[in-house]
Amino acid sequence: MAKRDFYEVLGLAQNASEAELKKAYRRLAMKYHPDRNPGDAVAEEQFKEAKEAYEILSDPRKRAAYDQFGHAGVDASMGGGGGFGEAADLGDIFGGVFRDIFGGFGGARGGQSYRGADIRYSLELSLEEAVFGTTAKIRVPTLVSCQTCGGDGAKPGTKSAPCPTCNGRGQVRIQQGFFSIQQTCPRCHGRGTYIPDPCATCNGSGRIEEQKTLSVKVPAGVDNGDRIRLSGEGEMGEQGGGPGDLYVQIHVKPHPIFTREEGNLYCQVPISVTTAALGGELEVPTLDGRVSLKIPTGTQTGKVFRIRNKGVKPVRSNSTGDLMCQVVVETPVNLTKEQKELLEKLAETLEQGGHQHAPQERGWLDGVKKFFEDMKF
């Protein structure tokens, strides 16, 4: 069954503030909590649905990914939300609610470490680079493992110790009104250990901020909105957690001649009145050279000519698109006296032939005449 929109679940607009998110979430949490609805499977599912929606939308990074890509941007592969396993601890499933309602604390359970966050990087390419592929060098700000402490957060020569608050369990039990729940330990954040003497370089986090240079191989045929995933090039997790991934978002700069729609390229080709009337042959550009385009006699402005296999081969397709050339008949400007006289003589000879030289004009005039006749009462 498809997931509902997270904003719809919480009953909010997409521009809802953080305070509005919390208020809506608190209302649904209190209404559908299993302790208030014992044995009601529907209420429990609604509670889980609201919890997942709030966990995504209350995280700025995940909310930005959801707003742009929907559920696909925060699925398991992106390190986002996820389902609720039947064997999950009740404190884990419902912990997020009480973190906001009762001021609880979040974190990992009993020594569990989480992978680092994913990173998004916008890469701007020319149309030629996107069509033929390229290798780009990028510099990305990220969090990497601290070299001083080796990533564990403790000062060299020392180590972490069992948390005295939870006795190493990573969980504590709290009582709030009629609720009694097991909650993540506020001191060790669920790890079961704490660092008595933290590393001075990373202040105990096990990570430091750093700029790193990466080489990104862009495949031929990418387009606006495509993403390239670099596994393990995201932020390093805290205190030994694995790294996230880097997602390179492709943005193709506007081209002075061509526009692209999937596999096809489009361009406008200006031609003179004489070429349009008498026909001719001219050269038009493509991304890999020039080709000859034949203009038939009597070509009208707006006519589109297809040049096959001169478009783009999209990255997910086995066929190459076409180049679509739209001709635009250009009206002469800055005419000399002699040129004007010649055009006037031409107009006279054309008028003598009636509408045989201008079939579109005749059809339009007939349509106008019928329009006014239909208006008569």
Image: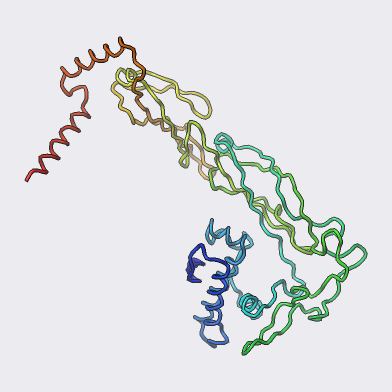
- What colour scheme governs how the chains and residues are painted in the rendered image of this protein? rainbow
Residue 274 falls left or right of residue 373: right
Give how far across and how far down residue 130 sits, in percent.
57, 38
Question: Observer-nearest residue: 73 or 274?
Answer: 274
Residue 366 falls left or right of residue 219: left
Question: Observer-nearest residue: 178 or 171?
Answer: 178
Give the residue drawn at x 33%, y 19%: 279
Give the residue drawn at x 34%, y 25%: 329
Residue 352 visible (yes or no): yes
- Residue 244 falls in which quadrant of the image? bottom right
Residue placed farthest to the bottom in the image?
A: 178
Give the residue drawn at x 30%, y 27%: 300
Residue 225 falls left or right of residue 353: right
Give the residue drawn at x 18%, y 32%: 363
Residue 87 visible (yes or no): no
Residue placed farthest to the left in the image?
A: 377
Give how far across and how far down residue 290 sits, in percent.
49, 23
Tally the numbered discs. Answer: 0
94 shown above or below 228? below
Residue placed farthest to the top in the image?
A: 338
Give how far across and how far down residue 156 sits, in percent.
91, 62
Question: Observer-nearest residue: 335 or 219?
Answer: 335
326 shown above or below 235? above
Give how far across and how far down residue 376 sits, in percent.
8, 43
